[in-house]
Amino acid sequence: MPNTPQFPADFTYVFEAFEVLESSLPTAGLDDLRPFYERMPLDPYITGKFRQRCFAHFIGPADQLRRLPHMQFVQSKRVNHLVGDVRREFAEIEDGFIAMPAVQTMVARFTTFMGIDPQTREIGVHQIRILCSPEFSGTPAPEGIHQDGFDYIGLFCVARHRIKGGTTRIYPARDQPPLFSRVLLPGEVVFANDRRVFHFADKVEPSDNAPGYWDLLVITA
Ligand SMILES: [Fe+2]
């Protein structure tokens, strides 16, 4: 797998030197995911209509993902001051989405990169679209610079359509300058150690006088 460092067995130690890594994915197949993003429901837990969202969790491997029973998504108040400790009920990701080769590629890339055993380690898959229009901007992270409350996260860019902004940023601490700032393009991913670094993404605005969107896949373990 090009561009992907191989972690030796002492993963935690090596990860100190590689808290944030970027690499790219082949973009083939990402366009096929658009219909699944189009029909997601709006996130009811934010003020405003700028985020659509589905969630599910699975046991792997990537090409044989087994959906685990539906559950509510809860983050602690410690990591999410806006909706921490709220039991959030998101629509399940569609079976057809998980069957898409591009999704399986992203899941496999995540588990391989993190060196986790997909047969035993549960992963969370968050399908997210951030919307914007001439009337409103989209705020990907209303909670500010944050952690998700997991060990590892992968932030995959699936699509950017008629937008500007949305720079993904990784921080060593909430009150320090970012270690990493980049507008992720479709097929690009940032892997982060969620216990050691914080993340954020700038607001998204239309690049033309028309609505736009940013499609993401966030994988957690
Ligand atoms: Fe996050």
Image (spheres, rainbow, N blue to C red):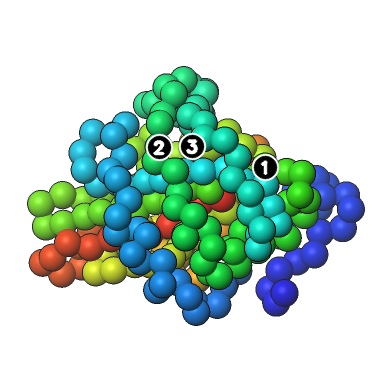
- Do tag 1 and tag 3 residues touch (Cβ < 8 Å)? no
Neighbours of disc 2 within 10 Å: few (<14), some (14-19), many (20+): many
Q: In the rendered view, does 38 fall on the left or right side of 197?
A: left
Front-most of residues 53 and 205: 53
Callout 3–callout 2 Cβ contact below 8 Å? no
Q: Secondary structure at mark 3?
A: loop
Q: Percent x, y for residue 76?
A: 52, 23
Q: Position of residue 21 (x, y in %)?
A: 63, 60
Q: Toward the viewer: 189 or 175?
A: 189
- Amino acid on which disc 2 is placed: Phe
**Dot 2: element:** loop
The quarter in which the N terminus is drawn is bottom right
In this picture, residue 78 sits left or right of residue 203: right
Between the C-alphas of marks 1 and 3, the distance is 22 Å
> What is the quadrant of the C terminus in the image?
top right
Mark 3, residue position: 146
Q: Amino acid at mark 1?
A: Glu
Q: In screen coordinates, is 197 left or right of 92?
A: right
Residue plotted at (25% across, 47% down): 50
Residue under label 1: 122
Residue at which label 2 appears: 90
Q: Please say if 182 is above or below 60.
A: below
Q: Give the x, y percent position of residue 167.
A: 39, 58
Tell me the residue at 29%/59% (across/down): 38
